[in-house]
Image: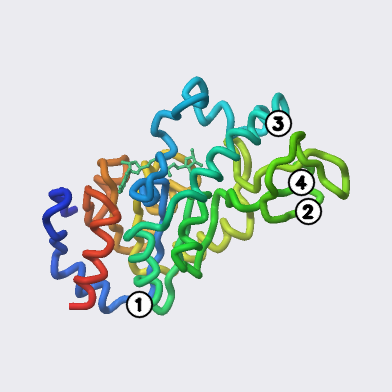
Amino acid sequence: MDYFRVILGFMTTIFPSELISYLRASTRVAVLTGAGVSQESGLRTFRDAQVGIWAQYKPEDLATPQAFERNPRLVWDFYTTRREGAGQTEPNAGHLALVELERRFAQFSLITQNIDGLHQRAGSRTLIELHGNLRRIRCSQGCGILAEWVELPESVPTCPKCGAPLRPDVIWFGEQLPPAELEAAIKAVNTCQAFFSIGTSGLVQPAASLAFAARSRGAVLVEINYDPTPLTEHADYAFHGKSGEILPDLVKALEE
Ligand code: APR
């Protein structure tokens, strides 16, 4: 494994020529992104300490069905804060570079754990949202109502069909991933020639296992993350720095 610490800010990322040649010859690429990709848009990563009134809570204490059962209004307020935060940010150079990479490879799958909607706003099309999306809401009793997020009325909105509380269309701790998205992610893992793990601590399953599955099938595994993670030692190449700097450098290196 080649390990590259990208000197932040002023240096262009150096990519080994064999990686660039391999990617130029590849047609099938899969990418997994996490909260680190949105950090340069100004969004705190998932495990950054919460701020303001949310500092007293761990995300794990809010993003669970039990928390919603106990206090739906508190959970709605938490996600309203996150949705408003996401709405006030713009996609960064890393999101835009991923759109360029999508155009370059015949089969490109962007699997994301992020719920902030920034990949769509950047223009990514081949998106697989493993953990849902803050811009949607759905019935908490699964009667299929799915709608664009409404401004939160005074009381928690209820399902027009069954009367149960509506909830943000995001996956909470302890919940199953959406079957169709998981199936699409596994298909991408099983066919890709190169797998990129970008801006994720690789701590949450089953998303974290996708990189290992791709590697075990013979895909070249590339990590782009600010800090080392449990994946680093298993990656063929690990670039540690800001994805908003490294990804545009990768697009440039592929074009040269
Ligand atoms: N560029 C690249 N990586 C970055 C940057 C950046 N500018 N800033 C932070 N990072 C890295 C951090 O080093 C960290 O390893 O992004 C990673 C973010 O990790 P987490 O905060 O754990 O977020 P994530 O991996 O997306 O969490 C996965 O866990 O709790 C669930 O559903 C939640 O989707 C989330 C999932």
Question: How far apart in space, not on screen, are marks 4 and 1 (Cα)?
Answer: 38 Å
Sequence-first disc among 3 and 4 = 3
Q: Nearer the viewer, mark 3 or mark 1?
A: 3
Is the C-beta of the residue carrying label 1 under 8 Å from the nearest atom of ligand 1?
A: no
166 to the left or right of 237: right
Q: Which residue is mark 1?
A: 104
Question: How far apart in space, not on screen, are marks 3 and 4 (Cα)?
Answer: 13 Å
Which element is circle 2 on?
Answer: loop
How was the colour assigned to the protein in this rendering? rainbow
Picture disc at residue 72: 3
Where is 157 relative to 188, above or below?
above
Question: How far apart in space, not on screen, are marks 3 and 2 (Cα)?
Answer: 19 Å
Q: Which residue is mark 4?
A: 139
Q: Residue at x 25, y 41 (%)?
A: 228
Determine whether label 4 and label 2 are within 8 Å by CB: yes
Determine whether label 3 and label 1 are within 8 Å by CB: no
180 to the left or right of 32: right
Q: Amino acid at mark 1?
A: Arg
Is the C-beta of the residue carrying label 2 under 8 Å from the nearest atom of ligand 1?
A: no
Q: Amino acid at mark 4?
A: Cys
Question: How far apart in space, not on screen, are marks 2 and 1 (Cα)?
Answer: 36 Å
Q: Quadrant of ligand 1?
A: top left
Sequence-first disc among 2 and 1 = 1
Picture disc at residue 144: 2
Question: How far apart in space, not on screen, are marks 4 and 2 (Cα)?
Answer: 6 Å
- Residue 26: x, y in percent? 31, 76
Q: Amino acid at mark 3?
A: Pro
